[in-house]
């Protein structure tokens, strides 16, 4: 049984109590620079003594900034338009950006997402201090509800492990839940197992546009899910091995829950899906029709993307509930490559023609908002 990982900082790298957990969550990959030893802990982004502007706040775990935690910096950033420059470190805490803190930007000062890690270890079934459990939404390490949020070079993680808590059956453990419109993530990592990245909107009927570029996400069950209109461009998705199961499927990469009234769901373009699990042990997607919105029609388009052998090419889609078969949803592919993209059973792999694929672009999905410009 793996011990529950707790991340610490050493001079050479991020370490975890469990070596196996470190391999899973990537904290040992680096190398990360030692906190407090860099002559310029905030890189090219100024410092408290040479502040870029009044709305720039500096976070440093050793006290060289305005705040030692991201949570405290967010609490101080009232209103709109603040920037948090975050020095290398592992910030073990939960953080929430409420709807009033709009147009906020977080920058990993070293410009290496492995250096700045925001991590906690709540699961849906984790008991809350006041009674009850956290649930999927409450398990999130970081929650962003404000519009206009941008993050660069940051790792968002949830390092809760099933093996460490066999008594807990609610194993969803969210690293990031993002609900705001115009939310952009560049060169970020999302680490977890089940329900790692929750790309959602703040309310049913509210459409939220989100953009993920040059990002990395890993997990096993439904680890990219929600009802946002989200574009994933040049991203890497990695499915994890599992020792608690002996048969396929181990899990599902995507589980969109797009509202029926929303014409645009998830778009994955020019990306890569690989795996550390045995070949064909993962499905590419399944539709999530939540009890709170039984009229949802999940939408996923995967185009110009390399699908590795970990994806079951014969039957890449599955049902989450037999009441809502994936064939009645909006799943499609276009010009994908790799062994996981082979079309051997055409009825199992809905393919778009050139004209049908034309609207499935980041420009169309994101409209007048251009975070990629």
Image (cartoon, rainbow, N blue to C red):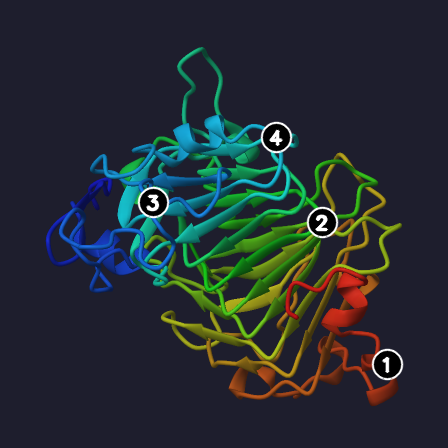
For the residues labelled 1 and 4, the Cα–Cα distance comes to: 43 Å
Locate residue 193 relative to residue 223 in the image: left or right.
left
What mark, if any, has residue 159 been given in the picture? 3
Q: Nearer the viewer, residue 312 or 215?
A: 215
Q: Nearer the viewer, residue 279 or 128?
A: 128
Task: Name which of mark 4 and mark 2 comes first in the sequence.
Answer: 4
Q: Which residue is mark 2?
A: 227
Q: Secondary structure at mark 4?
A: loop
Task: Name which of mark 1 and mark 2 comes first in the sequence.
Answer: 2
Q: Residues within 10 Å of mark 2 (few under 14, many from 20)?
A: many
Locate residue 46 relative to residue 368 in the image: left or right.
left
Task: Name which of mark 1 and mark 4 comes first in the sequence.
Answer: 4
**Is residue 24 in view?**
yes
Q: Nearer the viewer, mark 4 or mark 2?
A: 4
Locate residue 357 relative to residue 287 in the image: left or right.
right
Task: Name which of mark 3 and mark 4 comes first in the sequence.
Answer: 4
Q: Residues within 10 Å of mark 1 (few under 14, many from 20)?
A: few
- Quadrant of the snapshot with the C terminus: bottom right
Task: Name which of mark 3 and mark 2 comes first in the sequence.
Answer: 3
What mark, if any, has residue 356 been given in the picture? 1
Q: Residues within 10 Å of mark 3 (few under 14, many from 20)?
A: many
């Amino acid at each position: 049984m793996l011990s529950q990982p707790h991340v610490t900082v050493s001079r050479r790298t991020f370490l975890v109590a469990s070596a196996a957990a470190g391999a899973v969550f990537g904290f040992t990959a680096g190398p990360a620079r030692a906190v407090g030893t860099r002559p310029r802990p905030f890189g090219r982004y100024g410092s408290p003594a040479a502040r870029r502007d009044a709305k720039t706040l500096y976070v440093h775990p050793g006290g060289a900034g305005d705040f030692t935690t991201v949570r405290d910096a967010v609490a101080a950033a009232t209103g709109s338009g603040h920037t948090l420059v975050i020095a290398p470190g592992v910030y073990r805490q939960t953080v929430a950006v409420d709807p009033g803190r709009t147009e906020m930007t977080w920058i990993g000062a070293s410009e290496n997402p492995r250096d700045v890690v925001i991590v906690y270890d709540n699961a849906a079934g984790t008991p809350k201090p006041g009674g009850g459990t956290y649930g999927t939404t409450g398990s999130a390490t970081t929650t962003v509800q404000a519009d206009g949020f941008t993050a660069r070079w940051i790792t968002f993680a949830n390092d809760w492990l099933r093996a460490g808590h066999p008594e807990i059956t609610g194993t969803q453990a969210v690293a990031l839940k993002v609900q705001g419109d115009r939310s952009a993530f560049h060169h970020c990592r999302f680490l977890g197992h089940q329900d790692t990245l929750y790309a959602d909107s703040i309310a049913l009927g509210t459409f939220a546009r989100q953009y993920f570029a040059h990002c990395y996400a890993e997990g096993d069950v439904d680890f990219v899910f929600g009802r946002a209109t989200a574009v994933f461009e040049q991203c890497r998705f990695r499915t994890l091995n599992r020792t608690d199961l002996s048969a396929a499927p181990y899990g599902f990469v995507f589980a969109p829950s797009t509202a029926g009234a929303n014409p645009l769901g998830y778009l994955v373009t020019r990306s890569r899906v690989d795996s550390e699990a045995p070949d064909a042990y993962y499905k590419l997607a399944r539709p999530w029709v939540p009890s709170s919105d039984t009229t949802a029609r999940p939408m996923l388009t995967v185009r110009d993307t390399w699908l590795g052998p970990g994806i079951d090419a014969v039957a890449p889609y599955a049902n989450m509930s037999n009441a809502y078969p994936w064939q009645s949803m909006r799943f499609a592919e276009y010009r994908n490559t790799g062994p996981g993209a082979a079309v051997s059973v055409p009825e199992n792999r809905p393919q778009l023609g050139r004209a049908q694929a034309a609207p499935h672009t980041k420009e169309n999905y994101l409209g007048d908002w251009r975070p990629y410009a």
